[in-house]
Image: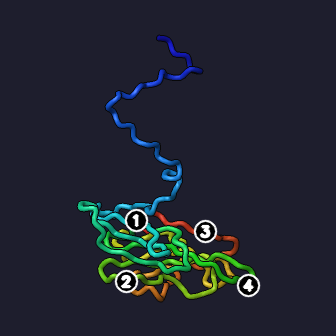
Amino acid sequence: VAVTASEGPPPVAAAADEIVPPLIPTSAFAAQGNFRDAILSPDGNTIAIQMELAGQPTIVLFDAETRKPIQRFGMGEKVGLEWFSWASNDRLLVGLSKSGDYFGTEALFTRLYVADRTTNEFRFIGNKSSILTGDDVIYAAPDGSHVLLNMQATPYETPSVFRFDLDKSRQGKQVEKPRADIWNYFADSAGVV
């Protein structure tokens, strides 16, 4: 039997004793899943997954072998989880955002945090200032000891590069001073700006 493209394949008849399952509603495929952005740790032993739990963005860590949850870090209700990345096997870098007033205009502020598996702490990394972008990581040391951030020290100057130790987190050391008309810095795989 020849089948033309306009006719399609011939219908397949179900056997009399065969049970045909009901159609799955389209809404089952259209709903957004609870899991997003799975990232494997550098050693391959842990999977970090973004989830929504109790109305707040949460990063849940799963054992890669057993697939069982082993730890979680909640972000809070009024923040957005922009991104996350492994800094080492025991530390995750997390970029969070929140709306706020910026000189009379509503703007989105971003900040960097570290989720530390060994201490179970979720710590702020950066300067407490009125800058907009505080999560522009240009380098993360493979051992998870420090990061380099491209950020403004104040809203009135161009960005510079700060080094923040992930243990201390509060005091950054400026490693590249601001330069006129330079808004983005980059670092190579060795952390050279």
Label 4–label 2 contact, CB within 8 A: no
Assign a secondary structure to mark 2: strand
Assign a secondary structure to mark 3: loop
Task: For marks 1 and 3, give the CA distance.
Answer: 29 Å
- Which residue is most to the right? 104
* Residue type at tag 4: Phe
Please provide percent x and percent y for residue 39.
Answer: 39, 61
Residue at image position (39%, 37%) is: 20
* Residue type at tag 2: Glu
User: Image quarter for residue 87?
Assistant: bottom left
Badge 2: residue crowd in 10 Å (few <14, some 14–19, many ≥20): few
User: Residue 160: in sight, yes or no?
Assistant: no
Label annotation for residue 49: 1
Assign a secondary structure to mark 1: strand
Residue at which label 4 appears: 103
Task: For marks 2 and 3, give the CA distance.
Answer: 30 Å
* Residue type at tag 1: Ile
Label annotation for residue 121: 2
Query: Mark 1 or mark 3: which is in front?
Result: 1
- Which residue is most to the front? 16
Mark 2 or mark 4, which is nearer the start of the sequence? 4
Q: Is residue 74 above or below residue 66?
A: below
Assign a secondary structure to mark 4: loop
Left or right, 84 with respect to 41, comes to: right
Residue at which label 3 appears: 184
Left or right, 43 with respect to 10, comes to: left
